[in-house]
Amino acid sequence: MHSPIKEVNPQSESVEIVGWVHEIRDLGGLLFCLVRDRTGILQVTIPKKKVSPIVQEVMKGVTRESVVRIRGTVKAIEKAPGGRELIPDNVELLNSCETPLPLDVVEKVSADLDTRLDARFLDIRKPRVTSIFLIRSAMMDAVQVYLFSRGFIHCTTPKIVAAATEGGTELFPIAYFEKEAFLNQSPQLYKQMMMAAGMEKVFEIGPIFRAEEHNTTKHLNEATSIDVEVSFADHRDVMALLESLIVHVYGQIREQCSDQLAALNIEEFPIPRIPFPRIPYEEAIGIATAKTNEKISFGDDIGTTAEKAIGDEIGEHYFIVDWPTAIKPYYAMPYEDQPHLCRAFDLMHPRMELASGAQRVHQYALLVEQIRAKGLAPEGFEFYLNPFRYGMPPHAGWGLGAERLLMTMLGLNNIREAVLFPRDRHRLVP
């Protein structure tokens, strides 16, 4: 059985490694070959006069990014990557690689993001890019472990639906036999139905689809949402859950992914402090108006310029709370004494919005009233509304964008770097 390169050490009597040829340097009588797997890089040193003719013959067909299996002994050598080198007894070429490569995996020649995404399978071989997705995997594991440890039940909801989650036109229609259907914008309605089912605390990690015609560095048309819903809870309860989850994820990444953070040249990885500041919407638009000299009226949404101004002022994760009821979805609970405001919140990083949530309306009559107030027909939401007639508990929840969380944690320039195969307005392949 082969050993992960990271675990190979000079105390090993004999090892077998498999991986890709990262670089080859031929110095005449001495050949250096760097072999890479997802755990690291190992130098293979081949003195041509001291290895078997079979090894020499195999090495003639080895090009960069060819796949090899190598067996031999390991020696300590200070100048080699990781302070060790492998002297081969046997080299097997498992698959050769065509040349020239469409992308430089060693990154001596830089490539723009579109070129990288066109050859994504090669781009991900880069240790720096591999590190992003190893961290993403650890992030998702940390999220699930945290929620399971707090009694949450994992659920899976449909991605093909008959009705829009929040109304509007940002929908991908699909042909579904004789019916009209759409790709789901959010698991929101189904999470709430699980509250009526008595499941009390549920989460889902899955794709969401938004037909927004954006060409920005922070939008995707297919994204991964981390969604939570909790019965017998209000907006404050789930805000506390969300900020604690964020802190837990940061802590797990710092503890488990030091090698990957180093590969990304991230020297400091501070864990956010809690509680995050709670900034009322009215105060937030005041900050934005003062910083940008652009008038933002009560009831206006907070755009990118305003977000940046507020983020620069706050300088850390924060919540925007007490939003105008008119600009939040119909399921956001209004305050009883100030019905023009609702118990909704957005979790913000200084760079962008990460999550949105609210205490939900759980009373049938009020929910129907708010659906109508948004210009929607309650008849189109009958499957959703029905559970509210039969003992729906008070509940609250949120949806957190996985790619945005990863992007802001790692300081990535473009959200497309945080997803394996991004889908945006123009990209449908690979």
Image: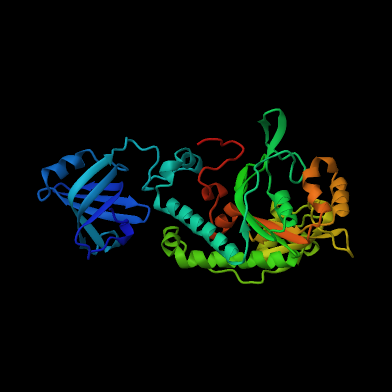
Which residue is most to the left? 49
Work out whether residue 390 can be spotted.
yes
Spot occupied by residue 89 in the image (x, y as percentages of width and height) = 16, 51
At 42% from the left edge and 62% from the top edge, which residue is drawn? 262
Spot occupied by residue 237 in the image (x, y as percentages of width and height) = 72, 67
Residue 265 in the figure: left or right of residue 313: left
Residue 124 in the figure: left or right of residue 29: right
Q: Give whichever of 221, 242 is nearer the camera.
A: 242
Residue 215 in the figure: left or right of residue 138: right
Residue 304 in the figure: left or right of residue 90: right
At 55% from the left edge and 46% from the top edge, which residue is drawn? 416
Spot occupied by residue 358 in the image (x, y as percentages of width and height) = 75, 59
Which residue is most to the bottom? 274
In the image, residue 62 sits, relative to residue 320, either above or below, namely above
Count of numbered circles on the image: 0
In the image, residue 100 sits, relative to residue 354, either above or below, namely above
Q: Give whichever of 366, 115 is nearer the camera.
A: 366
Spot occupied by residue 152 in the image (x, y as percentages of width and height) = 63, 62
Query: Quadrant of residue 161 in the image?
Result: top right
Query: Quadrant of residue 382 in the image?
Result: top right
The chosen color scheme is rainbow
Work out whether residue 299 can be spotted.
no
